Amino acid sequence: MPGFLPRPPGLFRRLGALFYDTLLLIGVLFLATAVLLPFRGGEAFQPNQLAYSVYLLVVIFAFFGWFWTHGGQTLGMRAWKLRLVTEEGGLPTWRQSGLYFLAALLSLTAFGLGFFCCLWDRDKRCWHDRIARIRMVRLA
């Protein structure tokens, strides 16, 4: 049906998927760090190392971006029956995924306000959904 969009998910479902993805992401970040350790002679990274922080941010974006551009779902989103689609109904591009990722970081760093706004938004969209012109939809 053209023009049909499955109903948008609520905040609980979004946060559930994010929680699942965070658990998976912890393992990915451990692996990404383990790859670098031989180049440092096994020496640990310090919290104030900008290059390491940027590296982890790139790894996090690669994790989410790959899933969003290849099927519109992370593993957590699949478990909670969610998918990202463009406003036209297609899969997000890497550019849209990058904008969505940066806007979601903004939503989180603003004490989660960007996520909580879906509670009063008429379309149940978060800041990052609107900024990147992407919809998160609930699958049947």
Image (cartoon, helix red, strand yellow):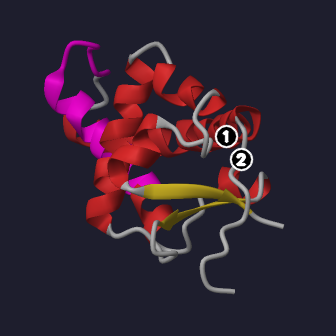
Image depth: mark 2 or mark 1 in front: 2
Residue on which the image places disc 1:
14
Residue at 54% across, 67% down? 72
**Is residue 46 inside the magenta stretch?**
yes
Relative horizontal placement of residue 112, taking residue 9 as reference (left or right) = left
Relative horizontal placement of residue 25, taking residue 40 as reference (left or right) = right
Secondary structure found at label 1? helix
Work out which residue is located at the far right of the displayed protein and give it.
Answer: 140
Relative horizontal placement of residue 84, taking residue 104 as reference (left or right) = right
Residue sitting nearer the eye, 73 or 21: 73
**Is residue 119 inside the magenta stretch?**
no
- Is the C-beta separation of discs 2 and 1 under 8 Å? yes
Q: Mainly helix, strand or loop, the magenta region?
A: helix
Relative horizontal placement of residue 38, taking residue 127 as reference (left or right) = left
Residue at 46% across, 66% down? 87
Work out which residue is located at the far bottom of the displayed protein and give it.
Answer: 1
Residue sitting nearer the eye, 50 or 103: 103
Tell me the CA gap for discs 2 and 1: 7 Å
Q: Amino acid at mark 1?
A: Arg
Q: Which residues are magenta?
A: 44-64
Residue on which the image places disc 2:
9
Q: Quadrant of residue 102?
A: top left
Badge 2 crowding class, 10 Å Cα cut-off, few under 14, some 14 to 19, many 20 or more, is many
Give residue 20's position: percent from left, percent from top: 69, 41
Q: Quadrant of the N terminus?
A: bottom right
Residue sitting nearer the eye, 55 or 39: 55
Give residue 103's position: percent from left, percent from top: 34, 38
Instruction: Find residue 90 and name its label.
Output: none
Secondary structure found at label 2? loop
